[in-house]
Image: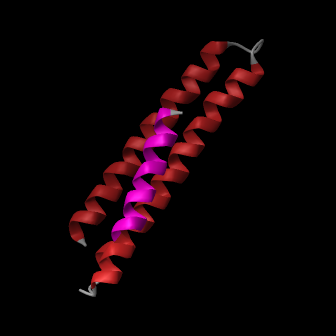
Amino acid sequence: QEHLSKCVQASVKTMGKLSDSVKLAAASLGSDQPDAQILVINSVKDVATSLKDLVSTIKVVVNSNNNNSNQVEYTASLLSESAKMMITSVQS
């Protein structure tokens, strides 16, 4: 739990830095490209949402103390799907 908490805190700091960088990138596009600015800014929102979902899934997996093979398989599937969504969001 403590390790998860530290990872989440680090992720929040990283997302803040990413957000600031994306704002600067959007501003550098200039006011004559508002659609491009919106796309760039929305990309950070998508990544943050995916990160939130991934962290939530990790919390479910960590809190799942059941050694039932079906439960382990289900939580592993959740984690895998959430991680894939995060990667897709970052790539986009």
Task: Determine the image quadrant of residue 39.
Answer: top right
Q: Residue at x 23, y 86 (%)?
A: 67
Spot occupied by residue 2 in the image (x, y as percentages of width and height): 22, 69
The answer to whether 30 appears left or right of 92 in the picture is right
Q: Is residue 74 above or below residue 55?
A: below
Q: Is the residue 7 above or below the residue 68 in the image?
A: above
Classify the position of the C terminus by image quarter.
top right
- Highlighted range, magenta: 76-91
Q: Residue at left 34%, top 82%?
A: 70
Q: Residue 83 appears at what percent x and percent y?
A: 40, 53
47 horizontally vs 30: left or right: left
Quarter of the image with the N terminus in it? bottom left
Q: Is residue 50 left or right of residue 14?
A: right
Q: Would you say residue 47 sits in the magenta stretch?
A: no
Q: Residue 69 versus residue 53: which sits nearer the camera?
A: 69
Q: Name the residue: 63% across, 33% down.
A: 41
Residue at (45, 52) in percent of width and height: 51
Residue 79, how many percent across, how many down? 38, 63
Residue 87 highlighted magenta (yes or no): yes
How many dots with numbers? 0
Magenta stretch secondary structure, dominant: helix
Q: Position of residue 71 (x, y in %)?
A: 35, 82
Query: In the image, is residue 7 above or below residue 23?
Result: below
